């Protein structure tokens, strides 16, 4: 590699980091706003299939490079726990579905130069309690798996918790989030007074 190629590479990395910062400044508040329309507040987030960046006492080169991209594929959960309706809205941001475990070849660290193209999506999981239930939805959610079946089909996850899932192309969520609001409203009511 020549010096000029190295300069071009590090400049491209710099621009990529700036682009990512701008992207997250747009997408993360959009998730907050979408969940807030349904009275759901932020609960937690975590990377999917990778670790968070290591602690300060851990040698960074001993970890997978993908661990330093914690929001590449990440999930964000929002909970609504009012008396009107308890619900959880979980967004799984699949910015690069090619590196998800179920799409990878082999067990080692994915090779970024040999990954197939994939369409970035957001997979939404929506959970709600049966009308009149007095159970804690967060506790119920922690004890069940993901909804099964086709997109938008309703799964009975336990005696009082139901759920569904579907995917939206990430570009469509960024471009027209009102379509996602309409889809969520099929399962979760808008709070009174909004």
Image: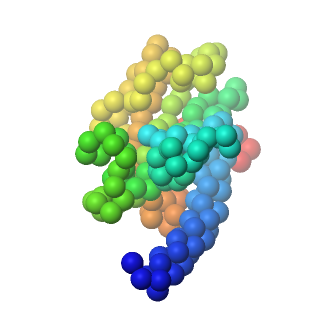
Q: Is residue 59 visible?
A: yes
In the picture provided, is 38 more to the left or to the right than 109?
A: right
Q: Does 190 appear above or below 31?
A: above
What residue is rendered at 37% in x and 47% in y?
A: 109
Q: Is residue 132 visible?
A: no
In the picture provided, is 167 more to the left or to the right than 81?
A: left
Along the line of sight, which residue is nearer the eye, 109 or 78?
A: 109
Along the line of sight, which residue is nearer the eye, 30 or 21?
A: 21
When asked about the image quadrant of residue 150, the answer is top left
Q: Does 153 appear above or below 166?
A: above
What residue is rendered at 57% in x and 48% in y?
A: 60
Q: Does 90 appear above or below 61?
A: above
Numbered label tally: 0
x, y percent for residue 193: 74, 44
x, y percent for residue 194: 71, 48
What residue is rendered at 44% in x and 40% in y?
A: 49
């Amino acid at each position: 590699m020549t010096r000029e190629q190295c300069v071009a590479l590090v400049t491209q990395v710099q621009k990529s980091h700036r682009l990512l910062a701008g992207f997250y400044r747009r997408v993360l508040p959009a998730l907050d706003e979408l969940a807030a329309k349904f009275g759901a507040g932020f609960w937690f987030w975590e990377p999917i299939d990778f670790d968070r960046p290591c602690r300060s006492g851990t040698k960074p080169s001993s970890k997978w490079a993908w661990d330093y991209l914690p929001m590449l594929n990440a999930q964000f959960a929002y909970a609504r726990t009012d008396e009107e309706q308890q619900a959880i809205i979980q967004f799984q941001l699949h910015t690069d579905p090619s590196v998800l475990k179920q799409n990878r070849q082999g067990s080692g660290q994915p090779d970024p130069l040999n990954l197939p193209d994939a369409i970035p999506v957001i997979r939404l999981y929506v959970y709600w309690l049966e009308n009149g239930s007095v159970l804690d939805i967060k506790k119920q959610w922690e004890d069940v798996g993901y909804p099964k079946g086709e997109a938008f089909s309703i799964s009975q996850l336990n005696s009082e918790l139901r759920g569904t899932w579907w995917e939206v192309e990430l570009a469509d969520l960024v471009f027209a989030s009102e379509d996602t609001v309409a889809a969520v409203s099929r399962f979760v009511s808008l709070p009174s007074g909004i």
